[in-house]
Amino acid sequence: MTDDAPVTEQPDTRPLDDLLDDIYHGQERITQADIYRRAVAAELPAELLTRIAALPQGEYAADEAADLLGGTVA
């Protein structure tokens, strides 16, 4: 028996996780704009950049950003 339901692949969030680990090193909160600038500079995939761009303006703690963006915090 096979399951014919389409499987939606989730993007690889490892680059996002690495970026968040890097930019939050020694920082408690980072603005959405700073996260986006660093993501562009790191050449993250377009889907991840779109997620970051969709965040409301403001400052985020590492766990907040990871939760909203679908990443994980180490």
Image: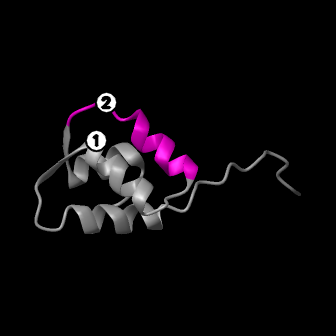
Residue 46's place in the image compared with 41, above or below, is: above
Q: Amino acid at mark 1?
A: Gln
| Magenta stretch in the rendered image | 46-58
Q: Quadrant of residue 17?
A: bottom left
Label 2 amino acid?
Pro
Local packing at callout 1 (Cα closer than 10 Å; few below 14, some 14-19, many 20+) is some
Tell me where residue 25 appears, x and y as whole percent: 17, 68
Residue highlighted by disc 2: 56
Residue 32 shown in magenta: no
Left or right: 20 as drawn, with respect to 1 = left
Mark 2 surroundings: few (<14), some (14-19) or many (≥20) residues within 10 A: few
Judged from the image, the secondary structure of the residue bearing numbered disc 1 is: helix
Left or right of 8, for residue 15: left
Residue 37 x, y percent position in the rendering: 35, 50
Image quarter for residue 28? bottom left
Q: Nearer the viewer, residue 30 or 13?
A: 30
The residue that disc 1 covers is 32
Q: Position of residue 27 (x, y in %)?
A: 12, 59
